[in-house]
Image (tube, helix red, strand yellow):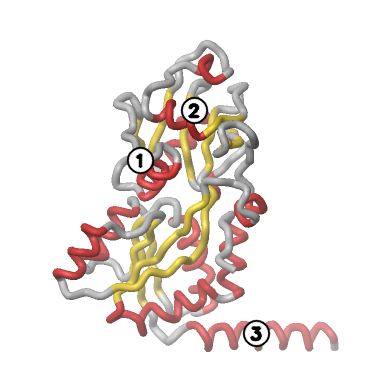
Amino acid sequence: MKTRIYTIALLLTATIITAAFAPAGLMLKIKGSDTVLPLSQKLAETYMNLNTEAKITVMGGGSGVGIAAFIDGTTDIAMSSRKIKMSEKMKLQEAGKAFKEVTIAYDALSVIVNPANKVKQLTREQLEGIFTGKITNWKEVGGDDEKIVAYSRESSSGTFEFFKESVLDNKNYGSAILMMPATGAIVQSVSQTKGAIGYIGFAYLETTVHALKVSYDKGATYVEPTVANAKNGSYPIVRPLFYYTLTQDAAKVKPFVDFILSADGQKVVGEVGYITVK
């Protein structure tokens, strides 16, 4: 009897969620940030499992690529790990398109090294030195006498922009920094190169790389990137993750966005490895 009641309760719950979040035949295209990509893929998968008539396609490429597609009308939602730029706002304004910005989650941007590297923590100033090309050998920051091989996302990435602003204090990347087209490529490269360093979204962390503790108070305290440290504000490199949608498409995108911001959607956010908005 208890089993039957529990089964009925589950069916009712699923029915309520479906009714609340999905009109029949919902079709959406989502494109942009590689950081937001695994989260959007999981959210779309969960949503479509609850709403079998819905079809949501998700593609990466970088925040800049997603926003460009958003401007030219080839995607319904742009995923971005940075705020939309003034130049992009102007293009939308010129096209007569009003837009809405929604924060769907937060990310603890993580600086990674090869596990064989004995350096386990760095200050913001040391990171700035490495990625601007002023520090080129690990012995300069307490490591072995070994050349630093630094990996960055390419300029179309919102992660590239955020790291430059928050960590490099808006200074330019060094000419020797290796620009990578995707976050997964940075993880793979750092895992295979002892002298490598890179930065990635928190959800991309794997056992094949090591996340450094970071200090933003000139070495007084070092904090590792964890969900708890991001939530309590002690980890310094935390950023919002955005969806950009057109105001004219509000009714179309609302069911999916409402689902993301609901308790069920935010549960997925936490499971994938991001920080919830509530």
Task: Give the image location of residue 200, x and y in percent.
Answer: 48, 42
- Counting residues from the start of the chain, the first of labels 3 and 1 encountered is 3
Task: Give the image location of residue 183, x and y in percent.
Answer: 43, 43
Residue labelled with disc 2: 126
Front residue of this view, candidates 119 and 33: 119
The residue positioned 62% from the left and 67% from the top of the image is 267
Tell me the kind of residue under disc 2: Gln
Is there CB contact under 8 Å for labels 1 and 2? Answer: no
- Counting residues from the start of the chain, the first of labels 2 and 3 encountered is 3
Tell me the kind of residue under disc 1: Asn
- Counting residues from the start of the chain, the first of labels 1 and 2 encountered is 2
Residue labelled with disc 1: 170
**Residue 208 visible:** no
Q: What numbered label is drawn on residue 23? A: none
* Residues packed near mark 1 inside 10 Å, few (<14), some (14 to 19) or many (20 plus): few
Please determine whether, in this image, residue 108 is positioned above or below residue 124.
below
Is there CB contact under 8 Å for labels 3 and 1? Answer: no
SS for dot 3:
helix
**Residue positioned most to the top:** 145
* Residues packed near mark 3 inside 10 Å, few (<14), some (14 to 19) or many (20 plus): few
The answer to whether 151 appears left or right of 203 in the picture is left
* Residues packed near mark 2 inside 10 Å, few (<14), some (14 to 19) or many (20 plus): many
Task: Give the image location of residue 129, x and y in percent.
Answer: 43, 26
Residue labelled with disc 3: 13
Q: CA distance from mark 1 to mark 2?
A: 15 Å
The answer to whether 247 appears left or right of 49 in the picture is left
The residue positioned 33% from the left and 24% from the top of the image is 176
Task: Give the image location of residue 76, x and y in percent.
Answer: 31, 71
The residue positioned 31% from the left and 34% from the top of the image is 172
Q: CA distance from mark 2 to mark 3?
A: 51 Å
